[in-house]
Amino acid sequence: MPAPMTPHSPKKETARITVLPDPPVKPAVEMKKTQPLIALPPAETPVTKVMVAPPPQPAPKMQIDDIPMPLCWGLVAISAAVLILQIWNYLS
């Protein structure tokens, strides 16, 4: 008969963390030998006027009504003929 199993408790591990002291504070920089600030001249607005042209008109696009009707019917007839040939080849 096997020995009964006892549940394991997790092993406790501890870690020691050393706390470092704060780094020493650096002294403030003394600015004894600095140059005075330069005063910028006031900004001037340009005097020239800008003429704005209207935007160019886009080229007219081709509409469906511009396609001739006989061409449309011709394409439908060719598509129907190709479909019939494909069905005929599949059945034979």
Image (tube, rainbow, N blue to C red):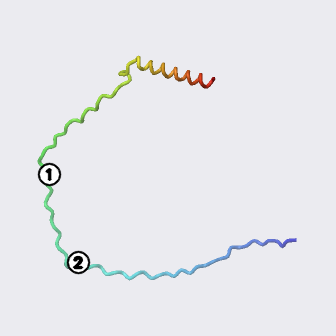
Image height of 40 relative to 82, above or below = below
The residue drawn where x is 14% and y is 58% is 42
Relative placement, left or right, of 86 versus 10 is left
Q: Give amino acid for label 2.
A: Met
User: Considering the numbered disc 1 on the image, is that residue within a helix, a strand or a loop?
Assistant: loop
The residue drawn where x is 85% and y is 71% is 2
Name the residue tied to disc 2.
Answer: 31
User: In this orientation, which residue lies closer to the viewer: 10 or 58?
Assistant: 58
Name the residue tied to disc 1.
Answer: 45
Residue lying at the far top of the rendered structure = 70
Dividing the picture into quarters, in which one does residue 11 lie? bottom right
Numbered mark located on residue 21 in the image: none
Image height of 71 relative to 19, above or below = above
Dividing the picture into quarters, in which one does residue 43 lie? bottom left
Q: Position of residue 36 (x, y in %)?
A: 16, 72
Q: Position of residue 83 (x, y in %)?
A: 54, 23
Relative placement, left or right, of 15 versus 47 is right
